[in-house]
Amino acid sequence: MSFRKARCGLALALLLSGCAGYSGRVAESRRLYDAGQYELAAQTLKPLVERNDNDRLLYLLDLGAAHHAARNFPEAIKAFREAEKQAGSISHTSISQEVGSVVTNDDALFYKGEDFEKLLIHVYLAMDYALSGQFEGALVEARKVNRKIDMLIAEGQIPYERNAFAKYLSGVLFESQGEWNSAFVDYRQLRKWNPDTPLLGAALLRMADRLQATQELEEFRKTYPNEKDFRLGKGVGEVVVLVEQGRAPVKVPSSEMYLVPVFIKRSFRKRHAVVRDAADKTVSCASRTLFDIEETAIKELNAKLAGMIAKKVASTAAKYAIGAGVAKASDSEFAGALTTFFLRATDKADLRSWSSLPATLQVARLALPAGRRDIVLDMVDASGGASKEVTRWTGVDIKPGKITFLNYRSPE
């Protein structure tokens, strides 16, 4: 290697060290999103999607989340569809990218998404289809969710990846369209995972009753003795409110080893919602957490830390080896030391994650008399203090024996 080539390598390393990473590029969209300015956040993300770089999947996920929060469901569906395609096309990492990540940093790799993030693409698609009244599309996504969960279980994934929100949403969607058998399958699967899953008892009893599964109905009566009013009365419908609460954690460099990331929790004041009939405050229910994204993200990262540390140790050794090679080829210890310095300077922790996710996904389910009704959603402080009305849906059409879906994104 000539000294001229060594200088070119140094220049490239210097250029790489000065490039803004994902966190810097999405800082403005993250600020706007956290401030509840969802459409503006989406506008800042669109040019990033067009860059078509290694972080395109993340930009698409953030774009879909911004449109979803803004209730622009057609654009949310479009973004999540593209994210699904992108995730499928980068499921494997090329050898050249792996080598590049050792020489520079993990930003040289395509962001492929965590397993729970890729599952949530279909969860959000199912929600957006349902919220826009496209139930055929919602059921397609529900079936995809079930296939992916089954695949994760078959691969021996640990229990927290059994996303109860995804499975429960699938069951409710099937129930809403009169596909009782499919709904019953989902609810029974949830019972196998955890019989204490919130909101599960009434759903199981109702499906067993509808399908005249007498033996299971009696079994569920014993398991859930407090669920007395599981049948919907004549002229009664349901509202299912999908609540996205808080903010997902973000990655920062570890204080113990700055080249690997750790998640830090973000503060938020609200913990759960109370949904009620505006005309009768006694008719209300609290939302229940079915998937803790915050906990899942932290556990997934912690499970990978040992492998990440080992890779960083190997990367550091490789950088020193490259520096030694430059020193020998150029007959210059200074050139070798400078090469090593700049290669080390390009290294950093991979801080990429789907940061626009909520901390938890919750569900509230309320039976109401049919007719047009105003539905109020209050958010309850983390301290358990008085609830505060944050949104009101006016003239919600409650139909006898039917399920109406509503959604609220709590930024606090």
Image (cartoon, rainbow, N blue to C red):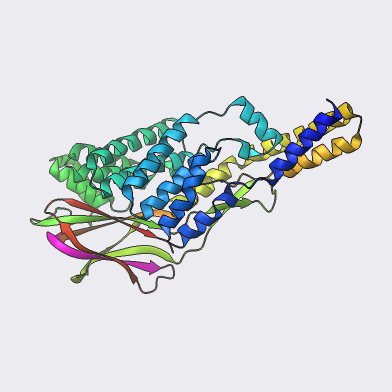
Quarter in which the C terminus is drawn: bottom left
Q: Residue at x 41, y 30 (%)?
A: 154
Q: Give the range drawn in magenta.
A: 369-384
Relative side of 11 to 197, left or right:
right
Q: Main secondary structure of the magenta part?
A: strand
Q: Which residue is drawn at 35% across and 55% down?
A: 362
Based on the picture, tell me whether residue 383 belongs to the magenta stretch.
Answer: yes
Q: Position of residue 101 (x, y in %)?
A: 65, 34
Relative side of 109 to 177, left or right:
right
Based on the picture, tell me whether residue 325 belongs to the magenta stretch.
Answer: no
Quarter in which the N terminus is drawn: top right
Q: Is residue 356 visible?
A: no
Q: Say if 214 sits above or below 31 in the image.
A: above
Q: Nearer the viewer, residue 342 or 98?
A: 342
Q: Where is residue 155 in the image (x, y as percent from the top left)?
A: 45, 30
Q: Nearer the viewer, residue 6 or 388?
A: 6
Q: Can residue 177 be seen in this view?
A: yes
